Image: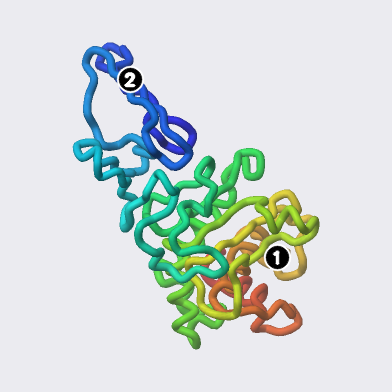
Amino acid sequence: FDEIGSTRLLTDTSGNVTDKYCYDVYGATIAHNCSTGSASQPYQYVGKLGYYTYYQEPDFGLLQLGLRYLEPETGVFTQRDIAHRVATSSYLYADNQSLVLVDPKGMLPTISCSKKSDPKGKVKKSIGRICNALKKGKMNKCGGCDSDPDKLKCLKEFCSQGKIECDGHWCRTDSETCGWGVDADGGYNPGGKIDICMKNGADDPAKCDNAKCATGQPLTLTILHEMMHLCGNMNDDDSRPNSADNQAADCIRKALQ
């Protein structure tokens, strides 16, 4: 497989190459070179993650990605995204960044962090801890979730519908902010995007404010803070107990310590 999970070579039991694949940027097969022992199989473009190529029906031309079909010639889905999205088309594939992003669920990419931005995989570990706590019900009574069931539902849905990017566009425009809720508009948007600014020290306790220092988990708090924004809390006044930072810190202390 290559870096995004596309099948490049197949080998036989002796290690001899039987098939070589080449694709364009959106998954259309440019070449399939066959040798002795070649096998017909559907897991080609991003096949490692389950993208299904209808190789038995070459005239069909679509790739199946979980819930939806991708049209490689145009680089868009044939059905709209079931997750509400702000400022972007509901038919885009991988936010038009198919060289680095994938979308195996046919909804949204999950985490896009290069080894340069996050060499130790801290973002994946942090969001994993948050989502595991949500799944187990540990956050049902923290951060205002007990009085706002829609917020709790939104936070849980973000774990399957949302997207996290490291050092993306918004981070490149700001040298101080630790994170951005890119699609936050005051409503409930579990399919939105978070930009985590690792280059600005989002995981550095030395650069944290009081709420982050108090939890001892600056990166986890930054991510959960932005999730709160996507799920309706746009309050950044940390002098108030219901600010996004303070509600996130409350959940970390009660569910993630």
Residue 38: image x %, image y %? 24, 20
Q: Residue furthest left?
A: 56
- The residue type indicated by label 1 comes to Lys
Q: Judge left or right: residue 229 versus residue 175.
A: left
Q: Does residue 251 appear left or right of residue 206 in this picture?
A: left
Callout 1 crowding tier (Cα within 10 Å): few <14, some 14–19, many ≥20? many
**What residue is shown with label 2?**
33
Q: Residue 132, image x and y in percent?
A: 44, 61
192 is higher (above) or lower (below) than 93: below
Mark toward the start of the polypeptide (2 vs 1): 2
Mark 2 touching mark 1, by CB under 8 A?
no
Residue at mark 1: 212
Residue at the image point whose x is 31% and y is 12% from the top: 16
Residue 34 versus residue 218 in the image, above or below: above
Residue at x 57%, y 45% (from the top left corner): 121
State the residue at coordinates (25%, 16%): 13
Q: Is residue 86 left or right of residue 57?
A: right
Local packing at callout 2 (Cα closer than 10 Å; few below 14, some 14-19, many 20+) is few
Q: Is residue 132 visible?
A: no
Report which quarter residue 220 is drawn in: bottom right
Give the structural element (helix, strand or loop) at label 1. Answer: helix
Q: Does 169 sit left or right of 20 as displayed? A: right
